[in-house]
Amino acid sequence: MTKIDYTDPSLYTNRELSWLDFNDRVLEEARQKNNPLLERLKFLGITQNNMDEFVMVRVASLAKLIAVEWDGHDASGLTPTQQLKAVNDKAHEQLTKQYITLNRILLPAIKQVGINLLQVPDLTHEQFQFIKDYFHDELYPVLTPMADDISRPFPFISNDTINFSLRLTKKSSDKSLYATLQVPKIFARVIKLPGGENDFILLEDIIERFMSQLFINYEIQEVAIFRVIRDMDLDVAEEDTSDLLKEVQQQLKLRAHGKVIRLEVSSTISKKLRKRLVRELKTEEDSVYEVNGPIDLNFLGQLASRVIGHDELKYEPFQPYQNEALTADHNIFDTIKEHDQLMHHPYDKFDSVVEFIRQASIDEGVLAIKMTLYRVSGHSPIIKYLGIAAQNGKQVTVLVEVKARFDEENNVHWARELEQMGCHVIYGLVGLKTHSKLSLVVRREESGIRRYIHLGTGNYNDSTAHFYTDIGLLTANNNIGIDVTNIFNMLSGYSKPPYFHKLHISPNGIREFIINRLDQAISYAKENRPVRVRMKMNSLSDQEMIAKMYEASHAGVTIDLIIRGICCLKPGIEEISDNITVHSIVGRFLEHSRLYIFDFDGEQQVYLASADLMTRNLNRRVEQMFPIEKPTLLKRVLDIYQIMWDDNVKTRVLSEDGIYQRVDRRGRASLDAQDFFATQATQLTIASKEKKQQNNPNQFQPMMSPENQHEPFSD
């Protein structure tokens, strides 16, 4: 028998190209007629935001590898130079598709229903007078034209800002002069116009119409809009700094001046002006993108949110469920002590997690609260209650990950705030990001000290919890409590537990556990015993993990994978991955939960985790994997997975040739898993309210106490 070489580059898809495939699936949602029209606008805007972050980090990383002349290759056999070329080629194709979607599909569609994104020539007299007054009263005092000549060099262009590049002549001369003008970010980009209920214009169109008033005695010969995306990755040398917080703050200042990785210019730009921008910004030619329409599609989310009426063009709202026993009307610790509690967000309210921390902050029996924070919202109620706990004399220890990408500034702010409120703040281990989602409440009770724990697959972020799908567990399991205590001791001090009772911890622990489980699956398959492995994650890119899955598939193990984003594994290869099936769900909510299910001859083991199967998660981050053992909760997780697996509306199936194809629904009833869970949550909420009214017919009681209410998230 021929030995299989699992390091063969042909067995792997390049990580960056796989990510671009994911963004293309998001783009398909913008083109999907079955989606509400205003939601399609948002999807198109999301593709831009996704791309910006991808360029700022991943493409920037490739550029760095090329700059230092690293001659290695990835699992698919591509060098950094080859990867960057392939990424730029594919990204150019995606840009073309984005603007075809905008110009030919979405703008005409919203116009048909009375939503108009207007140009200056389309305005009525009243609307023109409005933008003229708006320019003079609001914009003119703020705008700052920047000349570019011998005495005044080309100005610094900030990351992700919209700018004008101008070529001018003096009225008495034909000599070309140059200037730039930044569109201020302090103003809304989408401006509502009078005279029509849903008439809008972009800020840059107003500025362009009247910008001649900024250049008195000069004539504007050419105007082009451009935007740059810079290298915004944070390089923190933790080993060389005694104060991580100060080092992160310093790096944030330096990051603003990162190398230009992508230059977007309006497609009407002249060759001369284009060449000048490329030279001044030191941009590679392949990194220049000519845009046929408004630069930076992030404005589409703002446009959709400003539309008046037209609820029929939005997703139908649903009512997330909250177990009455997890509200302010009940002692949450009694509830958890009686039964473990499983929450599937956003279908179950995140308020239950907030309530857990709120009650801990004021409960007389609570001695200590320990928590990891990776990403929190701008107005986090959890931060507030941690502060209250400290002020109430509780021992509060919070690990704030100040290196959380693009949340560094926010997290530095909250770290300072928590310290001022009396919390003990730590920043994790040198060289590792702490990505685990853990909360520990230590409480003195009549029977002695008891630990209450929350573990989750997602962040303690009350905003993103409205549209990220995650699963969390509230438990008073003693062994889990001991494990979580040991994790916090490891993070805050000098401790290396020899083993964990229930949890598996990265770095290394989760990798070792899954490899062992896959080896066990292989031995079952070789004995012809029934075995099946099911997993759900955001991304799969770790070569060792993929190779082990190939080995398991070759042995006869059935492996079902639900992977929203990056997948470097190739399914369907004969004798290698023909027992592996890969689904991807892209829909209304961002699939974020991580599930790992092992079925060994009828013995089912179910685990949830904070980690994807990426090298960074397995080797360079502190992550946790935890079991679901209570039979009712185990069944619920299995049911959740099965419903997602059976989805035939938002699911795409990855084929051997790397193409994601929609499920053939002929002869089958349609099933949109996210819609199913949302409908189920609404039905449970209505039933709960009706039951409550029956029990208290003369008294209305709110689902939450006023102090636990917070504003809903608006995108």
Image: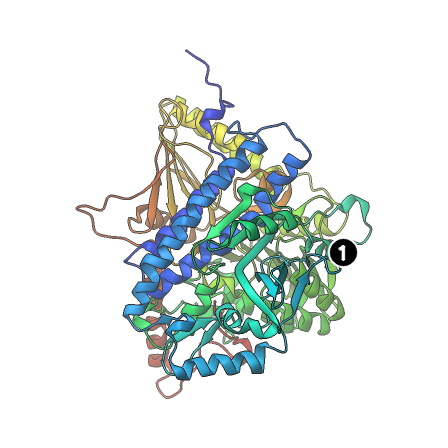
Q: Is residue 114 above or below residue 641?
A: below
Q: Residues within 10 Å of mark 1 (few under 14, many from 20)?
A: few
Say whether residue 626 is visible.
no
Q: x, y (%) of residue 171? A: 60, 68
Q: What secondary structure is found at the residue carrying circle 1?
A: helix
Q: Is residue 583 left or right of residue 467?
A: left
Q: Residue furthest left?
A: 667
Label 1 belongs to which residue?
Answer: 250
Q: Residue at x 28, y 58 (%)?
A: 34
Q: Observer-nearest residue: 670 or 153? A: 153
* Residue 289 locus on image (x, y percent): 50, 49
Is the residue 700 above or below the residue 363 in the image? below
Depth check, front residue: 179 or 295: 179
Q: Is residue 252 left or right of residue 135?
A: right
Q: Is residue 490 left or right of residue 222?
A: right
Q: In the depicted view, which residue is nearer to us: 481 or 227?
A: 227
**Looking at the image, can residue 242 be seen?**
yes
Residue at the image point whose x is 36% and y is 32% from the top: 657
The type of residue carrying mark 1 is Gln
Where residue 697 appears, as percent x and y from the top left, is: 35, 85
Quadrant of image for the N terminus: top left
Q: Would residue 509 appear left or right of 321 to someone viewing this image?
A: right
Residue 273, x across and y down, in percent: 56, 53
User: In the rendered view, would you say 258 is above or below 294?
Assistant: above
Q: How many marks?
A: 1
Instruction: Give the residue drawn at x 75%, y 45%.
Output: 237
